[in-house]
Image (tube, coloured by chain):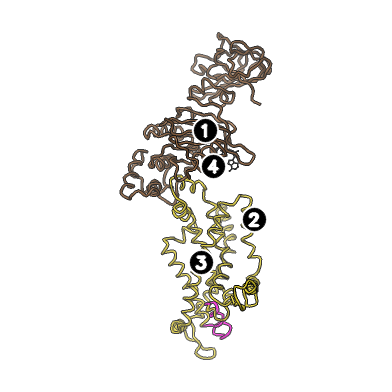
Chain colours: A brown, B yellow
Amino acid sequence: MHDLQCESLVKRFGAYTAVNSVSFNVPRGSFFSILGPSGCGKTTLMRMIAGFEAPSSGDIRIKGKSVLSTPPNKRPVKMVFQHLALFPMMNVGENIAYGLRCRGENKADIGGKVARVLDRVGLPGTEHKQVSQLSGGQKQRIAIARCMVLEPDVLLLDEPLGALDLKLRERMKIELKQLQHQFETTFLYITHDQSEALLMSDNVAVMNAGQFEQIGSPQELYNNPKTGFVAGFVGDSNRWSGRVVSLSEGKVRVAIDGGGEVTALAGDNRIAAGGSVEVFVRPEAISIGGGRDEVLGGTVESLLFNGASSRILVRMDNGHLVEVGQAVMDGSVTVSPGEKVQICWSQLHGRAFTTAR
Amino acid sequence: MARTDVGKLSFILLFAPFALWIALLIILPQLGIGYISLREKVGPGEYTFGFSNYVAFLSEPIYWNTLLRTAWMSILVTAMALAVGFPVAYYIAKIAQRRSRAALFLMCLIPLWVSDLVRAFGWIVILRETGLVSSLLQKIGLVSGPVELLYNDATVVMGLVYTVVLFMIVPLVSTLDGMDNSLIEAGYNLGGSRLTVFRRIVVPYAMPGIVAGCIIVFMLTAGSYLTPILLGGKNSMWFTEQIYEQFVTRYNWESGATFGVLLLVFTSFVVWLGLRLTGQSLASTVAKD
Ligand SMILES: Nc1ncnc2c1ncn2[C@@H]1O[C@H](COP(=O)(O)OP(=O)(O)OP(=O)(O)O)[C@@H](O)[C@H]1O
Ligand SMILES: [Mg+2]
């Protein structure tokens, strides 16, 4: 059963198409993210679902029923806004009670419900605080509580962590996921931050220029990207452009611009000999030394220490800079800047995609 | 040490014009008026001091009736200016496209380019017995003879609303402009109807602007002179007219000053009462946090 279904949604602003035939289904109780760069149409898509924009064509169904003719204040979807939009003239309790009062529930029930939802988001007894007295993370949770108290079918979240500082963002990611578990509600989450999307979601749709490039689980997107855009956008990747030399059994031999040849898996079926492609290899797939099927030479340029995600930057002989992520700085590989090294990876970890025009 | 001296000096230099302006043009004259209102002429060049002028005011119903009537009509004008100004301000701040906003705002300012006096005569040209409206009504056949639309309360109120509505619109636009659209959208999203969103979100948010606009408009109206006299005629019974008469026609400065003080005190009292009744405070209006 799907809580939310979108079918060939299109939104045009004049001649500009902000959302271009987007279709997806969100299963009940799952955490679905839409990941894309700034300006790709994420907010526009969400505003159509919330009813603030009318689609140019296509259909939106919630629990199987089309909601196109339902006004925004009657739709069973609630939204956490990018800047939260807590009402500054009301205190925390009134903010949460607002929706219940709009529904015309009686006073006695409202008090109990507000107290219960505050309890669930971990802020019991804060009814009488002013919104301005809350910290960023607390505001976040109030904004979610304000929606969840209405028991929506789908909760829409538009980059809700965008305004928080880095530390808090890391913590809220985990908290959001836990809240979603607790409420067992369908979350539709928008972000341009791939680590948020990968960490929290059951499914992620990668969006680019108004279209969905790929929908899949975080693992699928990371390990098995279907387009060059997804390969480049999800996770870190080394990217080289080059020309196809030969193609056989799903493997491509690519001459990299600047020199050197590598073999990689063919990522799409438009690849043809002589065509221009981009090769993607993740830093953690590359290690220093030899012994695997793809080997290139270069010079260590610098060491970037960052705990578990430390990197070695290697300037290859063909001029490209490569990030090497495997077995760094644990002492097993000792390199220093200026040293000549070889880097290697397995063919299975390289992926070639036709260059987008 | 030297730094703080420089800071002090620049503070004094910056503050001086403001302080001088307040002291010379507002406080001193008012003190003078207050002083004159307390003296009574007993002979040529001989004065005593006391509240006799105020007693005289209270014992003459026509005087305090005029004051009450002026206050009451000013409240009416303020309410109407709010009713007319709010939708206009909302349109300019929230609905109009960014590009047309400046143009609309400028259009609201156009009436200010024409002097008060000329504007009032403009109304007279339109509304008098031989004026535009009267002849138009006759031509259509709605009325048989010429109609006089001047010299009644409705015309005075309308003229005043027209004159002051701008001072309602400006503070409203600036507060509404600062309101994040997502507050309104959140209001709908959480299930609010148009009325609920307006009543519980837009109005409370705009309250500082509403209060500021109402105070300005009320004070301007209660103290206005030209519009009520020209549109309302000799019988308009506007309190400023009484003040003018005491000062100029009767040359009774003592009584004129008394009326002046009473107008100030009474309008301030009405503003205070209004703030109390709506649960607003002046501080939160001026210094919005
Ligand atoms: N009302 C509108 N009129 C015209 N163009 C619009 C309108 N709303 C959005 N757009 C355009 O649609 C495109 C997508 O906007 P949208 O706000 O959906 O981007 P986004 O993916 O949410 O970006 P961000 O991550 O920066 O929030 C943008 O190029 C924007 O200029
Ligand atoms: Mg956005």
Label 3, residues with CA under 10 Å away: few <14, some 14-19, many ≥20 = many
What is the CA distance from the residue labelled 3 to the residue labelled 2? 25 Å
Closer to the eye: label 2 or 4: 4
The three-letter amino acid code for the residue at tag 4 is: Ala
On the image, the x and y values in percent for residue B261 come to: 49, 76
On the image, the x and y values in percent for residue A160 come to: 48, 38
| Residue A54 marker | 4
The three-letter amino acid code for the residue at tag 1 is: Glu
At 51% from the left edge and 70% from the top edge, which residue is drawn? B74
Circles 3, 1 touching at the beta carbon (< 8 Å):
no
Question: Viewer-proximal residue, B286 or B214?
Answer: B214
| Residue B103 marker | 2
What is the CA distance from the residue labelled 4 to the residue labelled 1? 14 Å
What is the CA distance from the residue labelled 2 to the residue labelled 4? 29 Å
The three-letter amino acid code for the residue at tag 3 is: Thr
Label 4, residues with CA under 10 Å away: few <14, some 14-19, many ≥20 = some
Q: Secondary structure at mark 3?
A: helix
Q: Is residue A118 left or right of residue B139?
A: left
Question: Viewer-proximal residue, A110 or A49?
Answer: A49
| Residue A7 marker | 1
| Residue B227 marker | none
Circles 3, 2 touching at the beta carbon (< 8 Å):
no
Q: Quadrant of ligand 1?
A: top right
Label 2, residues with CA under 10 Å away: few <14, some 14-19, many ≥20 = few
On the image, the x and y values in percent for residue B192 come to: 44, 49
